[in-house]
Amino acid sequence: MFSALVEKYETPAKARRAAEIEFKEIANGLKNIYKENIKPIEELYKFDYFFSPFMEDVDFESKPMVLLLGQYSVGKSTFISHVIKRSYPGAHIGPEPTTDRFVAVMFDKQDQVIPGNALCVSADKPFRALNKFGASFLNRIEASLCNSKVLELMTLIDTPGVLSGEKQRIGRNYDFSAVIEWFASRVDRILLLFDAHKLDVSDEFKRTIEALKGHDDKIRVVLNKADSVSPKQLMRVYGALMWSLGKVVKTPEVLRVYIGSFWDKPVNPAHENAALFASEMADLMSDLESLPRNSAMRKVNDLIKRARLAKVHAYIIAELKSQMPAFWGKSSKQKEILDKLPDEFAKIAAKVRLPVGDFPDVNRFRELLEGFDLSKFPTLNEKYIRNIDKVLSHDIPELLKKIKVPQEQKDLKNLFTFESEWVISRVEKAESDKMFYRASLSDGKLGGAAARTILTQTGIPVEELKRIWTLADIDRTNQLDADEFAIAMYLIRKFKGGASTPDTLPSNLFPPSKRYHES
């Protein structure tokens, strides 16, 4: 069932070129805004040390990225393999912790694996800033290049399974949470995967989720392997998951949770919630499918957040520097300032009329400031502040006017879901799948003898069933796969409702996976 949700990407060339031109125009505009107005103030007040490295051209031009997080064996690598409809180079899947590194699954016509040190010096890859995490981390990241239509539109980031117990303290030679925070600031979507049989949130997983603070709009939760528990157990599992997340994710909004079974086998058709799982999985794929269309807007949104943070950072540093003595007593004064940093933040927010929500985490900021002499920072540069205000009030709004949805995009075929192209609904497909997978199959297909037993029970005249069988057997193999069986059941329902059986199969009954058969 789930494999039917991920179909071949076929977009009209005209629409695709228009989208690419628009994206390049927006990316170039953002690059100019950043270089001319935001980067100077970042350099002046060492923004890269406190938050994230300076941005490069490739950061504006890169494809959307999806980050997968979860404890070991929750199905992250399997999820990626299923979305791209193949196994990616270097993938290891098993019940024990198998992925011990970050893997950027990216598009290329030739399969290959690029080691971390080479990956993080490649000018055409958006990972050069990761060099700051040192050699230990660079030995734990790689790029897996493979040919997949999905990867032409986005990059998927597989991550090491989050550890628990004693393994949390001995398994990392780099700052895992800091790496996650770096990725979170750059990706378009963050998927937190949970196993229906393993809902505990370890200390490291808690720190990992806390590192996502400020990026709550990107987070989606996936409850995997849901068809392996009964409906009653699933209700309890869902409640336990929301309770666990509520203690970690400090937001008033409830996170969106997708429930399903995300791997290469169909959802258990006998499960009472099979239709729900099909709908949930389709919704998740639809969410991911929207990322390429919304990539330009996401990059604009992230640059706005960065500009606001750079402005707040400049005000903080300049205000703290202004309180430092000119000659002696610097050390004691700096300690006094850092001790009352929360009060300083409140005063600065009131003085310059900035929302407290724009200010960084006070404890972490204090730790980073301890490595600097506040007296050596420059005073406030009003020109740079005016430039930031101009970016937020004029430059960005003007750029936003260029983002539009081309008329041709209404005709784009859906990358992940089939309901917009296929008249058969998700619920109808789930019901037919129940019947299909309960039957005696041969190599995953329903033969004539087994089909006859099912179809004659519908009460439809034999001659009419023959016509429906011929129409549904698109491949002309005298066997029906799950999609073809769904077509047959759809035609039977229509006939019983009073409609006549068509002479040829209508185009809206061809599932995307069978489009090449349509003449």
Image (spheres, rainbow, N blue to C red):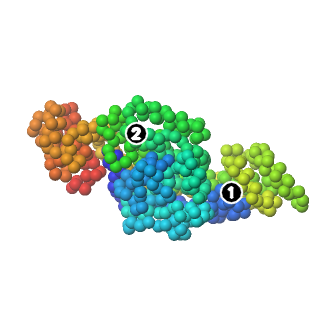
Residue 226: give its label.
2
> Dot 1, crowdedness within 10 Å: few (<14), some or many (≥20)?
some
Residue 50: give its label.
1
Task: Say whether disc 1 or disc 2 marks the residue closer to the N-terminus.
Answer: 1
Query: Which kind of residue does numbered mark 2 sit on?
Result: Ala
Residue 127 location in percent, x, y?
54, 63
Q: Residue at the spot x=47%, y=35% of the render?
A: 238
Judge left or right: residue 265 versus residue 42.
Answer: left
> Dot 2, crowdedness within 10 Å: few (<14), some or many (≥20)?
many
Is there any visible trace of residue 271 in the rendered image? Answer: yes
Q: Residue furthest top?
A: 232
The one nearer the camera, 302 or 337, is 337
330 vs 471: above or below:
below
Query: Which kind of residue does numbered mark 1 sit on?
Result: Phe
406 vs 343: above or below:
below
Q: Residue at the spot x=37%, y=39% of the render?
A: 227
Spatial CA distance of label 1 from label 2 is: 41 Å
